[in-house]
Image (spheres, helix red, strand yellow):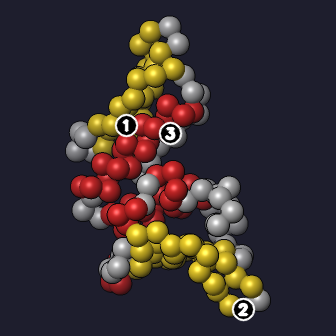
């Protein structure tokens, strides 16, 4: 079983019955996100998604959390530039050769861009309120 997690959360997977697992994510403040189901990656993804939603609701530094999660999910593969700017409302950028993610911390807007020649073009954008774990940064997603 693949052990996935998100920044600031620890994942624990226990088999509580034959083929039934309890997936628990716990943050530093003791908040928990839990799912009990059969042993598959979907169960883990659901628990991580619940933790993401908790983080989105209560995080005191959401922008930094989202930046760290984006770096983790992209796994530093082919990243050419990444920068977090606390002084600019926690805005950040992660750039690959022809694609980049920009988070506008002031307006809470995540923007996906692609480059053709020397111009960057917005391909998609998500407001913080509409942002969910599964749609956030997926390296296999064609828009990024």
Q: Residue 110 in the image: state x and y as whole percent.
A: 47, 72
Residue topped by disc 1: 25
Question: Which comes sooner in the sequence, label 3 or label 2?
Answer: 3
Residue topped by disc 3: 45
Question: Which comes sooner in the sequence, label 2 or label 1?
Answer: 1
Q: Secondary structure at mark 1?
A: strand
Q: Residue at x 51, y 20 (%)?
A: 38
Instruction: Assess whether mark 1 and mark 2 are in contact (beta carbons under 8 angstroms).
Output: no
Q: Residue at x 35, y 63 (%)?
A: 129
Q: CA distance from mark 3 to mark 2?
A: 37 Å
Residue topped by disc 2: 118
Residue occupying the far bottom of the picture: 118
Q: Residue 14 in the image: state x and y as whole percent.
A: 43, 20
Residue nearest the viewer, comparing 2 with 54: 54
- Left or right? Give the position of 101 relative to 62: right
Q: CA distance from mark 2 to mark 1?
A: 42 Å
Instruction: Assess whether mark 1 and mark 3 are in contact (beta carbons under 8 angstroms).
Output: no
Q: Residue at x 52, y 13 (%)?
A: 19
- Left or right? Give the position of 100 relative to 19: right
Comparing labels 3 and 1, the label whose residue is closer to the camera: 3
User: Would you identify the image quadrant in which residue 25 lies?
Assistant: top left
- Left or right? Give the position of 47 relative to 118: left
Residue nearest the viewer, comparing 72 with 118: 118
Residue nearest the viewer, comparing 26 with 103: 103
Q: Residue at x 32, y 56 (%)?
A: 56
User: Would you identify the image quadrant in which residue 13 lies?
Assistant: top left
């Amino acid at each position: 079983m693949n052990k996935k997690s998100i920044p600031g959360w620890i994942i624990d997977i226990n088999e509580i019955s034959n083929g039934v697992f309890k997936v628990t994510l716990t943050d530093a403040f003791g908040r928990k996100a839990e799912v009990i189901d059969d042993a598959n990656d979907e169960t883990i993804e659901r628990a991580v998604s619940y933790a993401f939603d908790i983080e989105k609701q209560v995080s005191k530094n959401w922008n930094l959390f989202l930046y760290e999660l984006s770096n983790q999910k992209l796994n530093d593969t082919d990243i050419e530039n990444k920068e977090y700017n606390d002084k600019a409302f926690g805005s950040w950028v992660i750039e690959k050769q022809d694609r980049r993610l920009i988070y506008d911390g002031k307006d809470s807007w995540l923007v996906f861009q692609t480059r053709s020649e020397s111009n960057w073009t917005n391909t998609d954008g998500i407001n913080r309120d509409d942002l969910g774990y599964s749609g956030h940064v997926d390296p296999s997603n064609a828009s990024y």
